[in-house]
Image: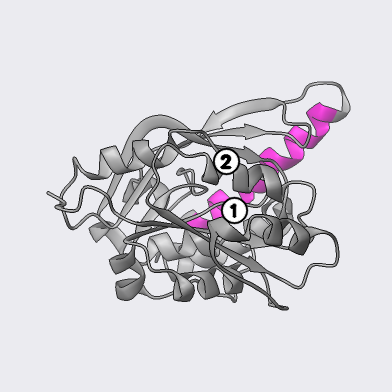
Amino acid sequence: MIKNNTPLISVIIATYNAGKTLETCLKSIIGQTYRNFEIIVIDAASTDNTIDIIEKYNEYIHKWISEKDSGIYEAWNKGINFSTGDWIGFIGSDDSYYPNALQDYVDHILTCKSDLEYVSSKMDLVNTNDKYIKTLGEKWDWKKSRLMNTIAHPGSLHSRVFFDTYGLFNTKYKICSDYEILLRPGNAFKTSFFNKVTVRMAQGGVSFNEKKLFKEHYQIVTSTGKLNLIIAKYYYCLQIAKSNLKKILRKIGYNI
């Protein structure tokens, strides 16, 4: 069992021109019922009022920087290096935690074995108008997860030992590096899942570029995931077909 009943949680936010949403995100962390956390903001040299918002909440932020980077995963890697927490989570600047999210995570972690590397829950997906779309998130299962990403990564927590063991995010990937890193442990990955919704995620962002997403996914499952090329190609084609079908149905009034 984990002996530390109040593990420090590092929450990392990557921002770029996030002035419209960052304050809501920060408030959702600051207002958590669980208090042993640190906030780290890595900004990519924003030109809007993002820095003004960061400075407004500076007393609650453990560390922040603003400088150009190559994308979200370089920002997250910087955040990891600045972090001091026992557990590390990542949340988008347009996402938000539900009030008991961190406490729910800690309560669950304390029921698990001490060698736990990763824990996830569920998330509510909303559109840009904050209208609910659906709830996502399943447990990590090697056989299924190397075919498709079934977990809700926003808000999930990685142990510090995980990054010490498997390294940082691969910045070669611009959309799916958070998926690739979870494939590195293979079938030995020590994970846990609890059936609660902890975070609200806004639809959109770089991951909504489906063509690039499918291409990266194929590269990752065949390299890091060591998936059979024929099976990987089948799922690649299936994803494209499903995406095209959805687009056709939306044009005729069926939004699925």
Residue hosting label 2: 28
- Tell me the mark number nearer the camera, choosing from 1 and 2: 2
Residue 247, magenta (yes or no): yes
Residue for point 33% across, 46% down: 141
For the residues labelled 1 and 2, say whether their Cβ atoms are less than 8 Å apart.
no
- Counting from the top left corner in percent of width and height, residue 78 is at 54, 75
Q: Residues within 10 Å of mark 1 (few under 14, many from 20)?
A: some
Q: Is residue 214 above or below residue 66?
A: above
In depth, the one of 65 and 173 nearer the eye is 65
Q: Amino acid under label 1?
A: Tyr
From the image, which quarter does the C terminus lie in? top right
User: Does dot 1 land on a helix, a strand or a loop?
Assistant: helix
Q: How is the image coloured?
A: one colour
Residue 227 seen anywhere in this rendered image of the structure: no
Question: Mainly helix, strand or loop, the magenta region?
Answer: helix
Mark found first going from the N terminus, 1 or 2: 2
- Counting from the top left corner in percent of width and height, residue 71 is at 67, 70
In depth, the one of 45 and 123 nearer the eye is 45
Residue for point 87% across, 29% down: 251
In the image, which residues are magenta?
A: 232-250
- Counting from the top left corner in percent of width and height, residue 79 is at 52, 70
User: For the residues marked 1 and 2, what is the alpha-carbon distance in whole angstroms?
Assistant: 36 Å
User: Does dot 2 land on a helix, a strand or a loop?
Assistant: helix
Q: Quadrant of residue 171?
A: bottom right
Residue for point 76% across, 73% down: 45
In depth, the one of 49 and 181 nearer the eye is 49
Q: Amino acid under label 2?
A: Ser
Q: Quadrant of residue 168?
A: bottom left
Q: Which mark is residue 236?
A: 1
Q: Is residue 250 above or below residue 223?
A: above
Q: Residues within 10 Å of mark 2 (few under 14, many from 20)?
A: some
Residue for point 38% across, 68% down: 84
